[in-house]
Image (spheres, helix red, strand yellow):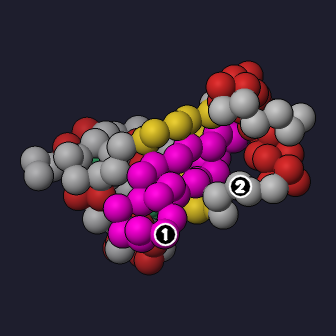
Amino acid sequence: MENICKTCGDCCNHIAIEIDKPETKDDYEDIYWYVLHNNVNIFVTENDEDETENECWFIEFITNCSALNEKKLCNIYSKRPKICSNYDPNCCVKSEGESEEIYRFNNAQDFLKYLKDKKNIIL
Ligand code: SF4
Ligand code: SF4
């Protein structure tokens, strides 16, 4: 892919961690609590690799890395954490290869609407 990373730096402005897909009332309650917090989001992508589990759920913290400079370059490039050096830009949402987000909850209202649409009255 064209090296769009040089003018981007978006992946250094958040942390996303995979979480278990919610199944119980308590799981949904936890997610409701997460998204009540500012700068904490949940997003869901399709899982192409596991036929038994068709969704991947992630919690996302919007927070910029202190090593990212004004030019959107890494100040500690040669000593950056392994998770950064292992990251494949082809898996980035800005590339064509990445799974599309199927849901995104950037606040509690988004999540409550999802539950209502799913008729999953748990709260
Ligand atoms: S991997 Fe994606 S989000 Fe990260 S800098 Fe490159 S284009 Fe931007
Ligand atoms: S250490 Fe460097 S590559 Fe890793 S998130 Fe921070 S700025 Fe980005």
The majority secondary structure of the magenta stretch comes to strand
Quick check: is 120 in the magenta stretch? Answer: no
Q: In which quarter of the image is residue 111?
A: top right
Q: Decide: is 38 above or below 63.
A: above
The image position of residue 120, as x and y in percent, is: 75, 36
Q: What stretch is highlighted in magenta?
A: 39-61
User: Which disc is residue 52 wearing?
Assistant: 1
Which of the pair 117/100 is nearer the observer?
117
Q: Crowding at label 2, few (<14), some or many (≥20) Cα neighbours within 10 Å?
A: few
Establish whether ligand 1 lies closer than 8 Å to the Cβ of label 2.
Answer: no
**Residue placed at 64% from the left, 58% from the top?**
21
Could you tell whether 34 is left or right of 70 in the image?
right
Which of the pair 8/25 is nearer the observer?
25
**Residue placed at 51% from the left, 65% from the top?**
53
Instruction: Determine which residue is flagged by label 2.
Output: 22
Three-letter residue code for mark 1: Thr
Q: Crowding at label 1, few (<14), some or many (≥20) Cα neighbours within 10 Å?
A: few
**Residue placed at 52% from the left, 57% from the top?**
56
**Residue placed at 85% from the left, 50% from the top?**
25
Q: Ligand 2 quadrant? A: bottom left
The image position of residue 80, as x and y in percent, is: 43, 70
Q: Is residue 67 visible?
A: no
Which mark lies nearer to you, 2 or 1? 1
Which of the pair 33/86 is nearer the observer?
33
The image position of residue 88, as x and y in percent, is: 28, 65
Disc 2/disc 1 C-alpha distance (Å): 15 Å
The image position of residue 50, as x and y in percent, is: 42, 70
Q: What element carries label 1?
A: loop
Q: Quadrant of residue 119?
A: top right
Three-letter residue code for mark 2: Pro
Quick check: is 51 in the magenta stretch? Answer: yes
